[in-house]
Image (cartoon, helix red, strand yellow):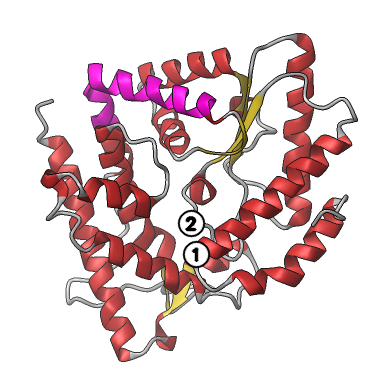
Amino acid sequence: MFFLETYESIKAWKDAHISSFLTNHVSLNTFHDRVMRKVLEVAMMNMGDKGAPCHFAWFLTGSGGRLEQGLISDQDHGLVYEHSTPVNDSYFKMLGSELANGLDVVGYPYCTGHIMSSNPVWCKSYREWERQIKNWMEEESWKSIRYLQIFCDARVLYGQKEYIKQLKTVIHQYQKEHPILLRRFMENVKHLKNSIGPMGQILVELHGVHRGHINLKYGAFLPYVNSIRLLSIKEGLYETGTLERIRILQGNAKYENLLKYSYDNFSSLLNYRMGLFHVEDYDDTHFLNVKTLTKEQKKEIKRILKNGKKLHDTVIDLINNSRE
């Protein structure tokens, strides 16, 4: 990839080689990381020869932060830089816009929620980030809690990893001193899209281009992702990947039975999504056509969905009834 010096050439290389990395989700996400780092390299090159004026961290959130991207992934990223000066503020504002533009050209669509380095909310100096996170925790809005949850999945792709760890420590410490914060996290994700009907049937989309498909994102992935994130915040974990979080939480005796099947279930979900390689846009990567599944696969999907709902409901009850 060393000869790739434009976003268009990176896109051509990505499109030509990505099929070779569809063997498993680790391989695919390693590939995405590699492509995105190259986008950063070209973005900084386009900014001029002087380089960044201070230390910084470029981080991913969302599925990228959790190492759970599918074949097509949208953008979720931010910037933290060492300190605020007119020169630094100007540089990273321009770099954030350059990154968002470059990623879009390469094939990572703009985030519809504007979770991108081009958004001033997600591009700040370390001290500004610290103040912003404290404000999010003290506010009582749905939006501020959503932003905090997004930040909890942040993973540094390039630069100073300690910036993100230190900022997450601010959240963990506040949560210990103010248990109400965990309940606010819980309230933000307690409503769940039903994926299993009253007769035990898989509920599919009834209308539109995805009629007959199950929405994997809302019906299958989010019950696991949100539940495990809640437990991770409660226990002060810094890890971002759902599988890694499960592995660590399973080592805690109080979660051993609750998470008994979660690792295998979530691994299977990632594998099912890996099979969705005949897709044309980002939305398509969330939908699985139930009619293409074998009898055994349908049985497995149904079990994963039921266990995901049980996990979700149990974690919600656990936090609701917590006296901490």
Task: Residue 126: name its quadrant.
Answer: top right
Res 109 seen here: no
Per the model, the C-alpha gap separating discs 1 and 2 is 7 Å
Q: Are marks 1 and 2 in contact (CB under 8 Å)?
A: yes
Q: Quadrant of the N terminus?
A: bottom right
Residue name at image x 21 percent, y 23 percent:
179
Across and down, in percent, residue 250 comes to: 21, 50
- Residue that mark 2 sits on: 68
- Identify residue type, mark 2: Glu
Q: Quadrant of the C terminus?
A: top left
Helix, strand or loop for disc 1: helix
- Pair 1/2: label in front: 1
Which segment is the magenta one? 162-184
In the image, is residue 59 part of the stretch drawn in magenta? no
* Residue with the most extreme front position: 2
Residue 118 vertical position relative to residue 206 in the rendered view, above or below:
above
- The numbered mark at residue 25 is 1
Is disc 1 surrounded by few (<14), some (14 to 19) or many (20+) residues within 10 Å?
A: many
Along the horizontal axis of the image, is 215 left or right of 202?
Answer: right
Across and down, in percent, residue 226 comes to: 33, 47
Helix, strand or loop for disc 2: loop
Residue 136 vertical position relative to residue 318 in the rendered view, above or below:
above
